[in-house]
Amino acid sequence: MEDFSKQEKTYMQRAIELANPRRRIVSPNPSVGALIVTSQGECFEGVTEPVGGSHAEIVALKKAGNKARGAVLFSTLEPCSHYGHTPPCADVIIDSGIKKVFVGIEDPDKRVQGQGIQKMKKAGLDVSIGLCKEIIEEQLQAYIVHRKTGRPFVILKLAITIDGGIAAPDGTSNWITGPQARQDVHMLRSLSDAILVGAGTIRKDDPQLSVRAVQGIDPLRVVLGKIPPGAKAIPAKEMTGDLEEILQDLGRQGVLQLLVEGGAKVASQFHDRSLVDRYVFYMAPALFGGGNYKKAFEGKGIETISDIWRGEFVSVVKLGQDLRIDLVPKEKAI
């Protein structure tokens, strides 16, 4: 693996920072950050514009103008090599006189997949790949999954007690977690293209499924089953049938990230079919006790310890009195 300097890592980290807050604004395109550094140390920044606008590299090149000649470009994702809403970025980079390009990761889109890199190399540009690779893969995980599988990146979110409960025996559940955790849920919603619940959750809780506690864009609301008249989640998309087909349908509609917020039944349906890419548990320092409370997952479960499902913790964050615990299935860990 190529050994990158501290300064090179700093420049790419800046490109990553530029891309971070833009995901929903540019979806279903990937949010990309770019940085051009001249021989005199001047920096010109670019980030992906909404669909139909310029890609990050082109934004930075327009700012740099003639100063791009002989400069170095840092881009979190491989520059495109095909005609879409805009001309190929690789061609514009070559024509600009950029001498060296640092690419975070190769674009998994079948229309690119290394072709942009090869085009720049053939034109004589010095191209390095893999700078800050792990961070960028995490940032673009929804885009990567969507381009590789055609379906959205699926996050299953549950608010639970320490003993795995999501509701009391009478069905009440507001509120298991505190205000900081609930605000973080709204942030997670704002980063997701769509949010999915079962019709049972709509009937029981009548949630709005909107972004209210933070600034952001409301996700597309998806309900498995029939939406009751007058539900707060309306307008929403009703969907029925096989979950994998539903995910493919959402993927074709440009949904890169799907947040599943349904109850135990919906959680079990996604979990049992290995359709979850990331689990997000908001755990409160609370216990239901006994055994008659509503558990996080429905169904029979495993028969023997050798069949237990195991994942990998990727993040544990304290939110007020609660914990946000992120884990992924081991086979899906990037």
Image (cartoon, helix red, strand yellow):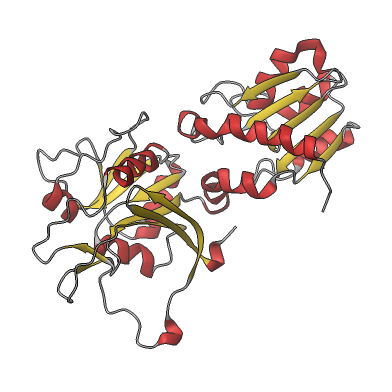
The residue under the point 84% across, 22% down is 71
Pick the quarter of the image with the C terminus: bottom right
Taking the spot 32% from the left edge, 52% from the top edge, the residue there is 321
Farthest-out residue, bottom: 304
Q: Quadrant of the N terminus?
A: bottom right
Can residue 4 be seen at all in this image of the molecule? Answer: yes
Q: Compare residues 324 and 128 and report the one nearer the observer.
A: 324
User: Along the line of sight, which residue is nearer the eye, 287 or 248?
Assistant: 287
Q: Position of residue 244 (x, y in %)?
A: 40, 59
The foreground one among 183 and 267 is: 183
Residue for point 64% across, 26% down: 56
Q: Is residue 158 left or right of residue 96?
A: left
Is residue 243 positioned above or below 20 on the image?
Answer: below
Is residue 116 visible in the rendered image? The answer is: no
Residue 10 vs 37, above or below: the answer is below
Q: Quadrant of residue 158?
A: bottom left
Q: Residue at x 54, y 67 (%)?
A: 330
* Whole-percent x, y for residue 327 in the image: 47, 61
